[in-house]
Image (cartoon, grey):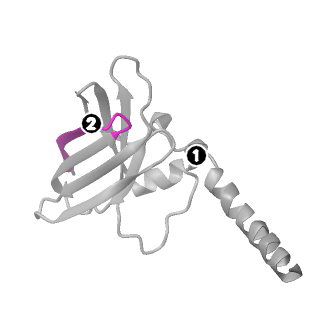
Amino acid sequence: MKKLIVLIAAAFALSAPVASIAAMDHGAMKMEHGSMNMEHGSGDVAHEEVVKGVKATFKVMSMKEHMKAMKMEMPKGMKETHHIAAEFKDAKTGKALTEGEVKLKVQGPDKSEQTKDLMGMQGHFGADFDLSKKGKYGVMCKFQLKDGQVRSSKFWYTVK
């Protein structure tokens, strides 16, 4: 009987940390990327449009610029040359829309393709891409925000 009570007590003791982790409000957790937000002024506004009530703004910045904004060193051997950030706002209220899934496909001047899921960052979504060749890049974005609607945006970005 004592063994059974000890086993039950041990099971409860071991399950408490798991339950507390599951109960955490992960939505309130913010990924800090230094002072990295769309307002810091770096990068070109490559494209802006309103899609089904959402204002989508895309910025392209060099990795050097991006890492400097985050107060970080450039990692050695990094092949990605640019950071692409996407910011979404309610077109009527201007309220930032920071929850959802965002996928970006970049087609290079040589017709090579890169497709990545953009990670939610402080106020925007972003990922790093290799835009090392000069020329015109086709950028296609599909995004599904909290309201469940799938939206898309396409634009050209020229690397000189």
Q: What secondary structure is the magenta-colored segment mainly?
A: strand
Three-letter amino acid code at the position of disc 2? Gln
User: In the structure shown, which secondary structural element does the residue marked by tag 2 occupy?
Assistant: loop
Q: CA distance from mark 1 to mark 2?
A: 24 Å
Which span of residues is magenta-colored? 145-158
The front one of 79 and 3 is 3
Quarter of the picture containing the N terminus is bottom right
Residue 149, labelled with which disc? 2
Seen from this angle, which residue lies furthest front? 1
Q: Is residue 64 above or below residue 36?
A: below
Q: Is residue 39 above or below residue 79?
A: above
Q: Earlier in the sequence, mark 1 or mark 2?
A: 1
Residue 30, labelled with which disc? 1
The front one of 140 and 152 is 152
Residue 112 pos. (x, y %): 15, 66
Three-letter amino acid code at the position of disc 1? Lys
Q: Residue, x 40% and y 18% (percent of image)?
A: 93
Residue 97 pos. (x, y %): 42, 33
Left or right? Give the position of 124 relative to 4: left
